[in-house]
Amino acid sequence: MLKVAVKKQFGNFTLDAQFESPTPGVVALFGRSGSGKSSLVNVIAGLLHAAGGQVSLNETVLLDSERRIDIPTERRRIGYVFQDARLFPHLKVAANLNYGRARAHGSAFVSFEQVVSLLGLKPLLQRRTHQLSGGERQRVAIGRALLAQPQLLLLDEPLASLDSARREEVLPYLESLRDQLALPMVYVSHDFDEVLRLATYLVLMDHGRVVAQGGVAEMSLNPALRAIIGSDAVGAVVDGTVLGPDTQSGLTRVRVGNGELNVKLAGYPVGQPLRVQLLARDLIVATLAPQGLSVRNNLKGVIASVTADEDDSDLIAVDIGGTLIMARVTRAATRELGLVPGLGVWALVKAVSLRGHTFSAAA
Amino acid sequence: MSWLTPGEIEALHLSLSVASRAVLCSLPVALLLSWVLTRRRFPGRTLLDAFVHLPLVLPPVVVGYLLLLLFGSRGPIGGWLERSLGIHLIFTRNGAALATAVMSFPLMVRAMRISLETVDRGLEDAARTLGAGPWDRFLTITLPLMLPGILAGSITAFSAALGEFGAVITFVSNIPGETRTLPLALYSALQTPGGDAAAARLAALSLSLGLAGLLLSEWFARRVRHMLGR
């Protein structure tokens, strides 16, 4: 368990945030820029001093202002991947990697060879840091942090300064890090796609406060998230399991709740956990069993709630066997179809509008 | 070096020796002061800053005079040095080195401060998260990144030290073989009837030395920039 409770005043801005997240796992600190995410991470690292606060990881207390415990950064064993990589310009890549390794204490949980192969660093080792691309710099920075053998890894928007191609180049490395090392991570981001792909726990921040926290699936239905990412990006995130390929269509069948989704993905083994986001604006609600439609996905459920959303529309939450999904429909449709809680409905979504993200069984 | 007269060789040798001692001895002090002035906030910082820069604005004769008062045989520091350590500064090349060091000190501190200000504190924070304590960070990150400034400062200070005149002649006089450095030798030649040719030769020597210093400093700066990947 990672426990964080921090109070700090900066001019007009007050950081007053608490969260508790399960370990190992990836906690995403998500919020607009200026919401205090980076400051919170800096307090966890000990680079920023909090007036009052507690930070503890499992049984290790790193900061407790009441008990006057404040372990200095260099002894916290917290790896930090900065947005701007911060590689040492006077050292080659290999020497950058060895910087933390030479200063690591205790038993090594990851070896030099393991980090080099996990992050694909072999061809970069003899390079100078200014000869690296943005994505390569971040991979080296991640490797350098890992080799210091940290007990917690902080990543402060590590992809924010990269273009989308470079981002796609680094993301798979972060996914394999999460799945292959049982290392707790705190991932700061203002990009919800990154959160969807990486996070196991989500902490929403706004104006220096934690407004909501919980598992990603649970948080995807939270109105506080809608306030940050906007109605168009809102949609239920469901954790499903791969049932197998659909031989006729080439799609992959995924179990979610008591229903089944066809997702445009291929090559995943049966039983692979898969996270699927169903954007509310892509879902269609029908009160009769649909016929003669091209839509591949047809989930039967019961309306759990109807909440007013902006622009004269409503968000309809549908319970599909213990799992909630959400559809955005116009208020006129709500009225005409008589959509009220308790009503049995079908939720329809096109297979091509679904994206799945894999999580290994370990995460 | 047969094209130089023994007197010229002596002055050249003395100049180089005095300037190197001045630079080497003031280097650690300048490093410490530049760090304190850049990174620390304390009452009296502005005063200390002004004090360090005084030799830049004071007439060198005044600096020489103040050194005489402090480090002369009857001065508070000079007297103590003679009595307890047997070190004589007045009329010696060590004294010349001291006067030169004081005069070129602000140049060195200035160059170091500028380079320290350009060192990204974020890199030091990164080193901290990797387990480096304060001294470790300073030696492995800050100091190597300051290297261009340290080199530039040292070479500028060395070149200035070769030319220091007023403070040296006031503090340690003009003694051949002991304190008569190149500029002092040049001055003596000008004071001697028929010394025009000798003066011209010494001036040419000073000129070549200065030029070599500048070229060397540029070459070093390039090497270091390359090493740092800029």
Image (cartoon, rainbow, N blue to C red):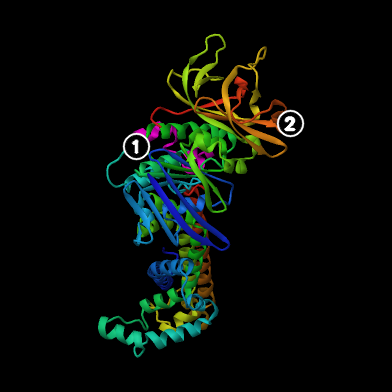
On the picture, is B206 further left or further right than A351? left
Is residue A313 in the magenta section? no
- The residues tagged by marks 1 and 2 sit, at their Cα atoms, a distance apart of 61 Å
Q: Which residue is mark 2?
A: A332
Q: Is residue B192 in sight in this rendering?
A: no
Q: Nearer the viewer, residue A142 or A303?
A: A303
Quarter of the image with the N terminus of chain B in it: bottom left
Which residue is at a point 69% across and 40% down the rendered structure image?
A310
Q: Earlier in the sequence, mark 1 or mark 2?
A: 1
Q: Return the mark for residue B227.
A: none
The amino acid sitting under disc 2 is Ala
Which residue is at a point 63% across and 16% down the rendered structure image?
A289
Q: Chain of mark 1?
A: A
Task: Please state the horizontal and vertical placement of residue A203, each as a whole percent of the image.
Answer: 50, 44
Which span of residues is magenta-colored?
Answer: A112-138
On the picture, is A219 further left or further right than B28? right
Is residue A119 in the magenta section? yes
Q: Return the mark for residue A112.
A: 1
Q: Is residue A275 above or below residue A99?
A: above
As drawn, which residue projects farthest toward the bottom? B74
> Which secondary structure lies at badge 1?
helix
